[in-house]
Amino acid sequence: MKSTRRNVALTLVGALTISALAACSSSSDGETTTDAAETPAADEPVTIQVAMDEGLEQGAIDAFDERIAQFQEANPNITVEKQEYNWVGTTFTADLAGGTLPDVFTVPFTDGRGLIERQQIADISAQVAELPYADDFSENVAVAGEDADGNMWLIPIAAYGQGIHYNRALFTEAGLDPDAPPTTWDEVQEAAKTISDKTGQAGYVEMTSANTGGWILTTLVYALGGRAETQEGETTTATINTPEYKKALEMLASMRWDDDSMGSNFSHDWGTSHADFAAGKIGMFISGGGDYGNLVTQNAMPEEDYGVTVLPLEGDDGAVLGGGTLAAVNAKATPEEQAAAVKWIDFYYMEKLTDKDAAIADAQVTADQDQPVGAPVLPVFDKATYDESQEWIADLINVPLEQFAPYSDNIYDQPLAAEPPVATQDLYAALDPVVQAVLTDENADIDKLLSDAETNVQGIIDAS
Amino acid sequence: MTWVRGGGLSALILGLPLLFVFGMFSWFPIVRAAIMSFQTTNLVTDPVFVGWQNFQQVLADPLLSTAVLNTLYFAVLALIFGYPIPLVAAVLMSETKRGKGILSALAYLPVVVPPVVAVLLWKTFYDASATGVFNTIVGWVGLGPFPWLQDPATAMPSLVLEATWAAAGGTIIIYLAALTGVAPELYDAAEVDGAGVWRKVWHVTMPQLRGVLFITFILQIIGTAQVFLEPYLFTGGGPANSTTTIMLMIYDYAFRFGSYGKATALSLMLAAVLAILSVIYFKATAKWSKS
């Protein structure tokens, strides 16, 4: 009797497990194989979820809703639902695997190649090729969204070069001229010390967590003329244990331990650094040059306090680490949803870059809601197209352009270099502890840290 | 038919919901994880079987030894602080004549605070600047400011301090319940024999609590081996990997790098080690428990 019961129970459990497994595998099969070449029916009703930045002010949300209404009017068969979303390195993979991402979402340039290689996003290259500006993307920018054969799976929607954001109010309080920000790394260090001594706030802050430590360290290294990886044919070599990485870390160590000008928090990530900077707790920090919108809209920074300048470049190969944002379509979207998603990307992100009426309409809606219009960024296409688009909306520009001058007067003349091409986020992640060690351990052995990191990163590159 | 008449069928029907819930939410994920540990998968494209590759890669990961040592360090610190403190507190509270209820409630209060809220609260307490809450307090007696979470040497003890505060209440309640089961006659007899408070605790309370102590000890070991919340929310494993634990490594494999195969492989290895440890512990202490 006992054994019969046990057998029945076991059979039941087995059946449950097998049926659940079967259900899971069949659903994942069905969802992942979407054929890009399949032609979707033209006017079938379709609903798509699109990403909207998290934590926006009501004005920005209203502006977004207005754009949705305009899109739906032009495309009556498409219903657009907004979903709050920000790309966060530590949760993106989980969102992707869990299927909780909207149909249209954005990722940094860093992630494009990996997502394509692992086929974790929809192949929309056929639809993208039909867009009128498909061949006009700046070469540096286009490559971030293309596979090895040049098919564009992700659409570049914004590009930036890294810059030094600085708080003009803290500069003034410290007796520094906010219109003449530092132009060499020595001046950056001196200004950081002055701000720290005179105001009690952190003079300069370095992000260290959630892959940002490696990202910003590599930005410094690029500016000093180094690179994180070199490629020869198919072979990629990690170049971490180099004089440039050592110099960058020694500079940080000097600011931290000799000058004590970096505050007391050494676990900043993207979000906390931006929040603290906007709150007036940080004099200077390095991040993407296009972060003004986030600082003012999501972190309520007073616009008169904001300043930004270019990174000082040293050596023959000194370059600005470039980056940007790509729009992607969820791999689980049906062909109809994919087609609608590409239309949305074209409407919401791209038209304003290429079409005068669209540019003005977008800027008008944004300005009406008191949201920033016209903050300088890098061109997605060419400089002439970008300049033209800025002229279209000149009357609507509401950001204090003169405060961007140290950045916008120089960034277009600086050489731009793409991020390390292989296992980028893993490389950044491997460098996080190196930066943390230098900032939290006065006796950190920089040579050993770099040597270990290089071995580690080379292993990651070889395995990828 | 005998089985049906004997109530087997009705028992099975009654048990079905339970079997379903356990099947779907406990056993199925375990089976799925076991399968996944032999696969390369990103949960979007089709998985590929790769044999023992995930296990080999995890064992070859230079971070593994750091994570194991950090987890052991956390476990040892948590045992030193987290094991005796609730016991002492419970014994003292059980000796208190008045206000036992209020004391129990106060002790249990941290357990009621949602863990994430508690950690985020403590994170602000641990502010490394001279104006941080803890630094202000230690400043009153001329100490500090200490870097707390911002230094590889002090980060882990800081985590243990919060974890002990958060978990002690639950253990105290278990000990208090067990203490009420100790027959008062034993204390009376000890008193007649001239035993003081400490002799009563040592010769009456402790032997009577032995069974509970064994269980809480192994639960503590298992709990600390799986520590995740504190390093994840306080430090993200930093600074410089000084608080990276095995569970955080599993999380990073899965949700930071998308290597679900490696994450499940390490999970299985951790589960196996804990299972073996538990068996050894129970075998080793079985004789002592019965004596």
Image (cartoon, helix red, strand yellow):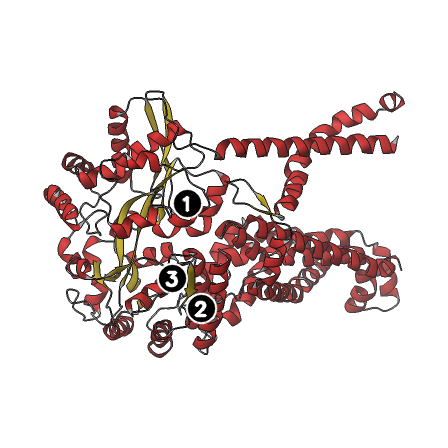
Distance (Cα) linking label 2 and label 1 = 29 Å
Compare residues A327 and B138 and report the one nearer the observer.
Answer: A327
Circle 2 chain? A
The tag on residue B97 is none
Circle nearer the N terminus (3, 1): 1
Name the N-terminal-most of marks 3 and 2: 3
Local SS, label 2: helix
Q: In this view, does B267 lie above or below A132?
A: below
Which amino acid type corresponds to the residue marked 2 in the rendered image?
Val
Q: Mark 2 points at which residue?
A: A434
The residue lying at 53 percent from left, 42 percent from top is B43
The residue pinned by badge 3 equals A231
Of badges 2 and 1, the one in the foreground is 1
Nearest the eye: A60 or B191: A60
Helix, strand or loop status at disc 1: helix
Badge 3: residue crowd in 10 Å (few <14, some 14–19, many ≥20): few
Task: Using the rendered image, report if marks 2 and 1 lie on a common chain.
Answer: yes
Tell me the chain of label 1. Answer: A
Chain ID of residue with mark 3: A
Separation of disc 3 and disc 2 at Cα?
23 Å
Q: Position of residue A245 (x, y in %)?
A: 37, 71
Give the left or right position of residue A145, taking residue B218 as reference: left
Sequence-earlier tag: 2 or 1: 1
Horizontal side of residue B9 vs A257, given as left or right: right
Q: Estimate the x, y position of residue A391 in percent, counting from the top left.
A: 11, 45
Quadrant for residue B10, please give it: top right
- Disc 1 marks which amino acid? Ile
Instruction: Rate crowding at label 1 as few (under 14), some (14 to 19) or many (20 or more) other CA atoms within 10 Å.
Output: some
Q: Which mark is residue A116?
A: 1
Q: Is residue A215 left or right of residue A426?
A: left
Q: CA gap, disc 3 to disc 1?
A: 20 Å
Residue A384 place in picture, x, y as percent: 14, 48
